[in-house]
Amino acid sequence: MPSKQDILDLYFMDSRYKLIDIAAFLDRIDRHEGEADYRYDGFHKALEAMLKPGDKPRAQAVLEALSDHSEEPIPKATIQGAFGACRD
Amino acid sequence: MKYIEPHAHMVSRTTDDYQAMAMAGCEVICEPAFWAGFDRSSPQGFHDYYRQLTEYEPARAKKFGIDHYCWLCINPKEAEDAGFAREVMSIIPEFMDSPTVLGIGEIGLNKNTVSELAIFEEHVEIAKKYDTPVLIHTPHLEDKLKGTKLIIDALKNAHIDPSRIIIDHVEEHTAGLVLNEGFWAGMTLYPESKCTPGRAIDILENFGMENIWMNSACDWGISDPLAVAKCAIEMKKRHHSPDIVQKIVYDNPVKFLSQSKNFNIT
């Protein structure tokens, strides 16, 4: 198995690039006019889950933070697509 | 390196893609029936589509030395109108004896509705009647966790052998749910959603190398028909042995697909 050093060699630059892109995305929203929607709140909830995942792996915690946790099938679909965050 | 692409929508791809996949070592492509990007206006449209899957695509693949198999169903995005879906499902038996049909798929859920779930359960009964394996689509993004749980519950109620079911598009929050219940799991390598190669390999390292495969699910959207081959290279970068790489991209698909009477590796 690769060492931590190997993983850093493989993925640090890619992850650094993605991290800065997330920061820039949040700055971009702040800079523009209008109101954000539930996706913005979901994104922050997911960031919080990443930083404080509890006993779960971070990726799982992020995915669960962005998931619909209701349990029953809905009566009817109003759209065919998905938006990536759950509208509470 | 030889590999199997166990989930690709080649009806949406160019012949150049077949050529590139063959050059990358792809020996077999399996194509589940899916949503064409628009709702078809009649059951006859599905009849034509099933002919494309069972006649035209195998011939197109064969020109590049690739064996092409398919799965049949009406996908969950077009299952909201249950009456329409049942009309389409009535066509499926006409094609079940085609020599390249593996089974029923990709059935599943999209928005986790009552109608989608009913049509999913009726598809499972078709699979039981014809004694075929099943390939299952799990919903996108925020709907995946709930949909995966609903699907697993429905399969338990159907008393179907989980070792003949592959539940596809798993991610970190659903892989354990699927594998712990004895189902096979599929990971999809997508540029904008689902798994990156790095995450797919994380899932392998965390959940093990058994009963799992990876696919590109390349279709009409932004997707990469060479994603499996590229992930195999990434596995090598992560110090996985050639035997393990072959197990994931070839041996595991052969093991699962061999449960279909029509699957013959040449």
Image (tube, coloured by chain):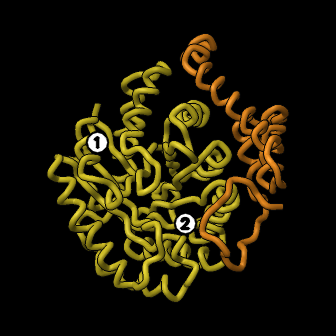
Chain colours: A orange, B yellow
Q: Residue at x 37, y 24 (%)?
A: B242
Tell me the residue that label 2 is attached to: B108
Q: How many marks?
A: 2
Dot 2 surroundings within 10 Å: few (below 14), some, or many (20 or more)?
A: many
Do circles 1 and 2 both sit on a common chain? Answer: yes
The amino acid at mark 2 is Gly
Above or below: residue B236 compared with residue B211: above
Tell me the residue that label 1 is attached to: B21
Residue B43 image position (x, y, % from top left) = 39, 84
Front residue (pair B144, A30): A30
- Does residue A22 appear left or right of residue B251 in this picture? right
Above or below: residue B138 compared with residue B159: above
Judged from the image, the secondary structure of the residue bearing numbered disc 2 is strand
- Does residue B151 appear left or right of residue B93 in this picture? right
Residue A88 image position (x, y, % from top left) = 83, 61
State the quadrant of the N terminus of chain B: top left
Q: Residue at x 50, y 45 (%)?
A: B190
Quadrant of the rendered structure where residue B219 is? bottom left
The amino acid at mark 1 is Met
Q: Alpha-carbon distance for marks 1 and 2?
A: 27 Å
Q: Residue furthest top?
A: A5
Dot 1 surroundings within 10 Å: few (below 14), some, or many (20 or more)?
A: many
Chain-order first, disc 1 or disc 2: 1
Q: Residue at x 59, y 79 (%)?
A: B118
